[in-house]
Image (cartoon, rainbow, N blue to C red):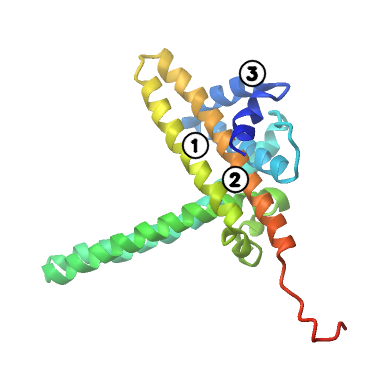
Amino acid sequence: MFNDSINYLKDSDDAAKTVLIGGVLAIFGFLIIPALIVQGYVIRVLRHVSAGDSEAPTFGDWGKLTVDGLKAAIITLVYFLVPAILAAVFVGGGVALANDVPFIGGLVALLGGLLTLLATLAVWYVVPAALVRFAEDGTMGAGFDYESLTPIVRDREYATGWLLALGVIVVAGVIVSIVAAVPLIGWLAAVFLGFYAQVTAAYIYARSYAEATEHQLREGPEVDDRRPAV
């Protein structure tokens, strides 16, 4: 899967054009709309890969990309509201309580910080699956279809893919940081490398999601032969 993910965009017919457009949009991401278009393209990648399409999609139908990117951003934001609320309630409350009862306040803040960290990791783990589910179905509600998502995120195929994508993101982050240290040219190159890494990770997420789905179908619930089929 790793080699396939690295070559996914490189081996496409419009690789250079796609990377160029993606990188330029990423440069102007601070304008929000370009960032949404890039996110919409990532959703398109998730949709293609989960459907078994080995050819990387191209940029096009900009309105659709923007809308999909906005929906994906909202889904992600809703998920990350959970750790944000935990942090506000427990960490913030603990700090406030520490003014009157230092020991209790500090303990509440510490436990709240730990709980927030665990919740953040859990959300980070689930969000890629939620975005693939959204990409497949096309509706925002699909991103919160926990009945469909639960068996996927508990599957070893998805877990393995998620860890692989994490490794790609970490390594890419280190490389991008080194390249970005070069004035101007290095920073520009880092943006394009970052876009390429984002697509690579998206491929892994979608592929592992698809493999987890297939695994669930193969390993489905066992049928009790003692019960008559009705």
Q: Nearer the viewer, mark 3 or mark 1?
A: 1
Mark positioned earlier in the residue sequence (3 or 2): 3
Percent from the top left, x then y, of residue 11? 68, 24
Compared across the picture, whether 19 is left or right of 106 comes to: right
Measured from the top left, where is residue 166 in percent x and y? 48, 43
Instruction: Please tell me whether mark 1 sits on a helix, a strand or a loop.
Output: helix
- The residue at the far front in this view is 225
For disc 2, the neighbor class at 10 Å (few under 14, some 14 to 19, many from 20) is many
The residue located at (59%, 20%) in the rendering is 20
Q: Nearer the viewer, residue 97 or 120?
A: 120
Q: Which circle's residue, 2 or 1, is located before the other in the chain?
A: 1
Q: Is residue 164 left or right of residue 90?
A: right
The residue where tag 2 is placed is 205
Q: Amino acid at mark 1?
A: Val
Pick the front one: 163 or 197: 163
Q: Is residue 28 visible?
A: no
131 relative to 219, above or below? above
Q: Can residue 118 be seen?
A: yes
Name the residue type under label 3.
Ala
Separation (CA) of disc 2 from disc 1: 11 Å
For the residues labelled 3 and 2, the Cα–Cα distance comes to 23 Å
- The mark found on residue 60 in the picture is none
Q: Which residue is mark 3?
A: 16
Is 157 placed above or below 190 here? below
Residue 93 sits in which quadrant?
bottom left
State the quadrant of the N terminus.
Answer: top right
Of the two numbered discs 3 and 2 in the rendering, the one whose residue sits closer to the viewer: 2
Q: Position of residue 133 (x, y in %)?
A: 66, 53
Residue 106 placement, left or right of 26: left
Say what secondary structure mark 2 lies in: helix
Is the residue marked by circle 1 packed among few (<14), some (14-19), or many (20+) residues within 10 Å? Answer: many
